Amino acid sequence: MTTGERDTAGVLAPPPVIYGVALAAGFVLEALLPSPDVSDAVAVPVGVVLLVAGGLLARAFIRAFRRARTPVNVSSPTTALVTTGPYRISRNPGYLGLALAYAGIAVLAHAAWVLAMLVPALIVVDRTVIAREERYLERRFGEEYSTYRRRTRRWL
């Protein structure tokens, strides 16, 4: 580590900000070019399931971090490698939870443009957050992280 360099992953921006910017851009596009209407009979149950699933996954991710006594904030140094709770299934349950909740909002709003903007958000999160975090965790935890990475999928 060079002088002045912090022991963090150095991500582009906190993932909630990335998802929030994409959500806002999607709603701007939706206002300019409205999507065709979708039946509430389909949109409401699907949207609610996505939103609730995303919220529950995000909650489980935060609880796992708190149990391990490691910061949730991506700009703080990681103090423990979390491999329990939702991390048994996915290396990125928090980002997956955010994506599901985002999709739920888009479906409930009948906003195809909002849903479409999830794709660039996921690409940005993958390349500028997850890739950097993986390099950081490899540096910080070495073989322990490499083993975890081999046995646990990135998303699902």
Image: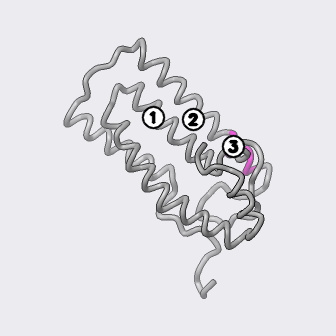
Task: Classify the position of the C terminus by image quarter.
Answer: top right
Q: Position of residue 33 (x, y in %)?
A: 20, 34
Count residues near mark 2 (Cα–Cα under 10 Å), then give few for <14, some for 14-19, many for 20+. Answer: many
Q: Which residues are magenta?
A: 60-66
Residue that carries the numbered disc 3 in the rendered image: 89
Q: Which residue is mark 2?
A: 54
| Disc 1: which residue | 103
Residue 123 in the image: state x and y as whole percent.
Answer: 43, 53
The mark nearer the N terminus, 1 or 3, is 3
Helix or strand or loop: what does disc 1 sit on? helix
Q: Amino acid at mark 2?
A: Gly
Per the image, label 2 sits on a secondary structure element best described as: helix
Viewer-closest of 63 and 122: 122
Q: Dividing the image into 4 quarters, which one contains the N terminus? A: bottom right
The residue depicted at 46 percent of the width and 37 percent of the height is: 102
Kind of residue at disc 3: Ile
